[in-house]
C-alpha cells in the first residue's frame, strides 16, 4: 500500500514567532488517528525549532531546498549534512519556483537528488508543466522529460526514498486548480512512465502528490482519484484550520 501524504510548503512565509504559533495550532488540531503522513516545510531558519516542537508528534519536517555539494565556499547555502544534523530527513527538490526564479536546471536538480539520497534523505521531487506547454499540448512531454532528466538516473533501491509531486505551474498560487480529472490523467501518465522504466512494483508503491491551489473546498475530490496519493499545499498550509481540513479530506 502506498503512503498517503499531505505536505505543507510554507515557502518564504512566517518569522520565528509566527512559525511557533502555526506549529502550536497544528499540534493542537491535526488528527492523531490518521494513516496520512503529515509533513511541514518551514524556512531554513525555522527548521530546528520545528523539529523541536514536533518531536513527540506524528508531524514530520522537510526542508524546502538544499545545496548539492557536501560543503565548501557556497555563500548562503545549506548542505544535506547540516539538515540531517538538526533532524531534518526530508527535502523538497525541483520546486517550480526554484526552477523558474533561481534557474535550477534538470541537471542541477539531478545532482541535488543524488546528494540527498547519499545522505539517506527522502526527496519530494517536484515537477510540472507551464501554461504554454499545456496550451501547446506538450504537457506530457515536458513532465516526462523532467522525470527522465532529473530523477530517472537513480537506482531502483532508491525509490523507497522518493515522493513525486506533480505541480502544474499554471495552478500554483493562482487560485486555478487542475480539475480532478486533469490531475488523475497526469498522475496515471506519471505512474505509467515510472512503470516503463522501473517496473510495476516501484510504480505502484511511489506516492504521487498533487500541488497547485489545493484548498479545503477542492481537496476531497482531488484526493478521491485513484492515482492521487495526497497533496503538496502552499497558501492553504499557512492557515492551520485549512491545512487540517485538507488532511481530514482524506
Ligand atoms: P499553492 O497551494 O499556493 O498553489 O502552492 C502550491 C505549491 O507550490 C506547493 O509547493
Image: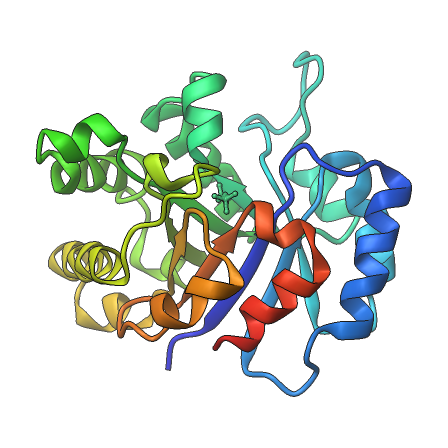
Relative to 57, is 15 above or below? above
Q: Is residue 85 left or right of residue 53?
A: left
Colouring scheme, one of rainbow, by chain, secondary structure, one colour: rainbow
User: Which residue appears farthest toward the right when viewing the image?
Assistant: 17
Position in image of residue 5 (x %, y %) = 50, 67
Position in image of residue 201 (x %, y %) = 24, 73
Relative to 110, is 246 above or below? below
Q: Residue at x 60, y 83 (%)?
A: 34
Q: Residue at x 26, y 44 (%)?
A: 152
Residue 54 seen anywhere in this rendered image of the structure: no
Position in image of residue 80 (x %, y %) = 63, 38
- Looking at the rendered image, the quarter that the N terminus falls into is bottom left
User: Which residue appears farthest toward the bottom when viewing the image?
Assistant: 33
Q: Residue at x 46, y 55 (%)?
A: 214
Q: Is residue 220 left or right of residue 239?
A: left
Residue 221 seen anywhere in this rendered image of the structure: yes
Depth check: give the residue in front, 42 or 84.
42
Q: Is residue 107 left or right of residue 51?
A: left
User: In which quarter of the view is residue 72 placed?
Assistant: top right
Amino acid at each position: 500500500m502506498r503512503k498517503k501524504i499531505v505536505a505543507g510548503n510554507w515557502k518564504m512565509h512566517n518569522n520565528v514567532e509566527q512559525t511557533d504559533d502555526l506549529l502550536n495550532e497544528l499540534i493542537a488540531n491535526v488528527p492523531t488517528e490518521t494513516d496520512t503522513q503529515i509533513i511541514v516545510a518551514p524556512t531554513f531558519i525555522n527548521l530546528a525549532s520545528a523539529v523541536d516542537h514536533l518531536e513527540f508528534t506524528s508531524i514530520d519536517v522537510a526542508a524546502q531546498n538544499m545545496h548539492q555539494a557536501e560543503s565548501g565556499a557556497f555563500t548562503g547555502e545549506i548542505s544535506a549534512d547540516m539538515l540531517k544534523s538538526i533532524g531534518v530527513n526530508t527535502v523538497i527538490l525541483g520546486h517550480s519556483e526554484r526552477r523558474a526564479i533561481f534557474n535550477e536546471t534538470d541537471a542541477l536538480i539531478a545532482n541535488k537528488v543524488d546528494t540527498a539520497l547519499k545522505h539517506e534523505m527522502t526527496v519530494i521531487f517536484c515537477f510540472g508543466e507551464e501554461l504554454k506547454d499545456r496550451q501547446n499540448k506538450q504537457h506530457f512531454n515536458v513532465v516526462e522529460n523532467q522525470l527522465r532528466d532529473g530523477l530517472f538516473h537513480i537506482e531502483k533501491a532508491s525509490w523507497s526514498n522518493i515522493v513525486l509531486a506533480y505541480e502544474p505551474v499554471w495552478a500554483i498560487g493562482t487560485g486555478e486548480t487542475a480539475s480532478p480529472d486533469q490531475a488523475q490523467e497526469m498522475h496515471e501518465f506519471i505512474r505509467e512512465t515510472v512503470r516503463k522504466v522501473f517496473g510495476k512494483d516501484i510504480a505502484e508503491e511511489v506516492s504521487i502528490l498533487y500541488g497547485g491551489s489545493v484548498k479545503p473546498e477542492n481537496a476531497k475530490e482531488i484526493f478521491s482519484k485513484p492515482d492521487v496519493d495526497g497533496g503538496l499545499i502552499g497558501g492553504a498550509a499557512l492557515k492551520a484550520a485549512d491545512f487540517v481540513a485538507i488532511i481530514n479530506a482524506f
